[in-house]
Amino acid sequence: MTCDPMERIAAALERMAPAPLEAPDFDAAGAFVWHTGPDRLEPVAEVSRVDIGLLVGIERSRETLLKNTVQFAAGLPANNALLWGARGMGKSSLVKAVHSAVQIDFPDLKVVELQREDLPSVGRLLNLLCGSDARFILFCDDLSFGHDDAHYKSLKAVLDGGIEGRPDNVVLYATSNRRHLMPRDMIENERGSAINPAEAVEEKVSLSDRFGLWLGFHACDQDQYLAMIRGYCDAHGVTIDDGTLRAEAVEWQATRGSRSGRVAWQYFTDLAGRKGVTLS
């Protein structure tokens, strides 16, 4: 018996199509990492993070993001958030610390890390998350786009949701060194060379406007830098007098040519090692 050619093609495509991805056990962990090839959500047994009380110099951003996250976890309206600004000032640390703090009262709040290069698969990820009773912070770290980068179009599926809308149980928190998610010189170059300069960059620049919260992070001063280190010392039981700490920490920042929360942690790591203290 001869089958219709279209029926044979349809049957072949059905055999080639991957089976629908089964949702993982979201009770197995509080954090997951999204991978593609094949699609899967990998649970993270222990998240590398800093206690929220140790994040110094970003108090206003901390309280704003904390309040927004509590609203979201409670099933209330909440905004997508873009944390932008100086390198090493705790943008990603804040996202992870806020999730940890809020999850104490709202254990169904999960965080899912999504790599920038996997943005084209975000639609499949959202379809998987929207069927769960849990609530998800979709976390995209170090987000930025280049001249010919079309990944930003996929991000609109999270921010705008297209015709279906963004799932009610998903919110996006992204970090970037750039306020508009693309280099300033690229914006100027496209404005200067395009036939219609305004439209040339409008689509990319307007992407950051779709985040309801913009939280800026700026370089810390020396007092904040030293306070960060003292907080780490107190939290981990590392003893050192103020004079020695100041002298060593200032010298450490001078060798790095910068002062930030990351540099403070790097100095503290060295100090703890010299003092024989293990960091858990």
Image (cartoon, rainbow, N blue to C red):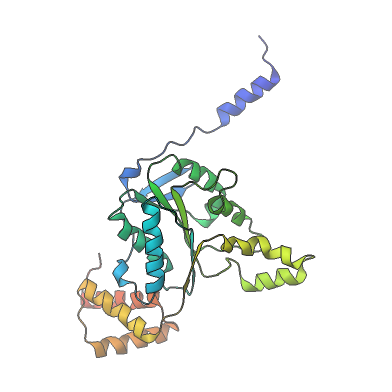
Farthest-out residue, top: 1
The structure residue drawn at horizontal position 35% and vertical position 62%, both measured from the top left corner, is: 98
Could one spot residue 37 in this view of the protein? no
Query: At which x and y percent is residue 206?
Result: 62, 62
User: In the rendered image, which quarter contains the N terminus?
Assistant: top right
Q: Identify the residue at the far front of this view.
A: 76
Q: Is residue 46 above or below residue 236?
A: above
User: Which residue occupies the extreme right position in the image?
Assistant: 195
- The residue lying at 39 percent from left, 48 percent from top is 135
Instruction: Tell how many labels.
Output: 0
Q: Is residue 72 left or right of residue 150?
A: left
Of 134 and 37, nearer the camera is 134
* Rendering quarter of residue 59: bottom left
**Residue 143 at x, y percent in the picture:** 52, 62
Q: Of 48 and 98, which appears nearest the observer?
A: 98
Residue 70 is situated, as x and y percent measured from the top left of the image, at 36, 58
Q: In the figure, residue 261 lies in which quadrant?
A: bottom left
Quarter of the rendering occupied by the C terminus: bottom left
In the rendered structure, the answer to whether residue 268 lies left or right of residue 94 reads left
Q: Left or right: where does residue 39 sit relative to residue 225? A: right
Q: Is residue 204 visible?
A: yes
Q: Is residue 20 above or below residue 270?
A: above
Give residue 78's position: percent from left, percent from top: 45, 56
